[in-house]
Image: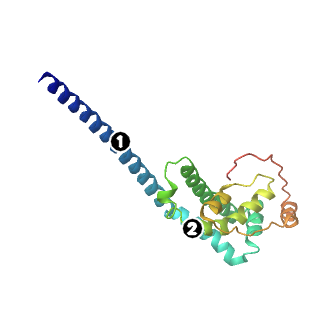
Amino acid sequence: MAGFQLNSGLVVSLASCLATWYYTYTYVITTERSQEANIFNMLYTEYSQPQMLDSIDLVEDLRERVGAERYAYEYFSLKMNNTKEGKDLDHARRCVVRWYSKLQLLYKKQHIRWERYGDVLPGANAAQFFVDMFEPLMIVDRVGLNRQLSPVFEWYISQYGLRASGFRVNQSRVNAIGDETGIRRSKAAMPNDEL
């Protein structure tokens, strides 16, 4: 009987260890998914905030007003002339690009998993809109200020298999805006400069 008691004690001990391991594993997975869901909700709510929507509308309105070929240059001219509209457009560009950059960082650091949320946050259609609408602004702004281009657009293009905006900067046009405004900035390119 002593051997049976030892074996039953060993079995109970092993069962207790397995139950503890299973509980801990389940707890960790549940906590991780709960945190991901909270981050998703936060990001989804941020994207729906009036500031974000107004920022997108402001750039979209400029594009509709002056045309797809001219709006990036018009944006840069307004910005360099320190007009209120130029400042508002620059703030709008920064707001949207920062949100997409933050989302990219959270995916890269796996605070949220691409395989769980990538199809809805931001989603292929929203990402294509972001590339089409904001990449030309970023390119003209960065070329005009001699700053490094942001890799955020390429990341979304790669993740979703999107088409690039196709925007090609006209350097002489950007230079003319710089000459017109009397502003010639020659900042050194900064790595991973997102704005």
**In percent of the image, x 17 and y 30: which residue is there?**
8
Residue highlighted by disc 1: 25
Q: Is residue 117 above or below residue 187?
A: below
Q: Nearer the viewer, residue 130 or 27?
A: 27
Residue 132 percent coordinates (x, y)? 67, 69
Q: How many marks?
A: 2
Q: Please give left or right for residue 146 compared with residue 53 in the image.
A: right
Residue highlighted by disc 2: 124
Quarter of the image with the N terminus is top left
Q: Earlier in the sequence, mark 1 or mark 2?
A: 1
Q: Please give left or right for residue 97 compared with residue 169 in the image.
A: left
Residue 169 percent coordinates (x, y)? 81, 66
**In percent of the image, x 75 and y 59: which residue is there?**
141
SS for callout 2 = helix
Q: CA distance from mark 1 to mark 2?
A: 33 Å
Residue 118 percent coordinates (x, y)? 52, 60
Q: Please give left or right for residue 14 compared with residue 5 in the image.
A: right
Give, as a three-letter code, the residue at label 2. Ala
Q: Nearer the viewer, residue 186 or 105?
A: 105
How packed mark 1 is, by other alpha carbons closer than 10 Å (few <14, some 14-19, many 20 or more), is few
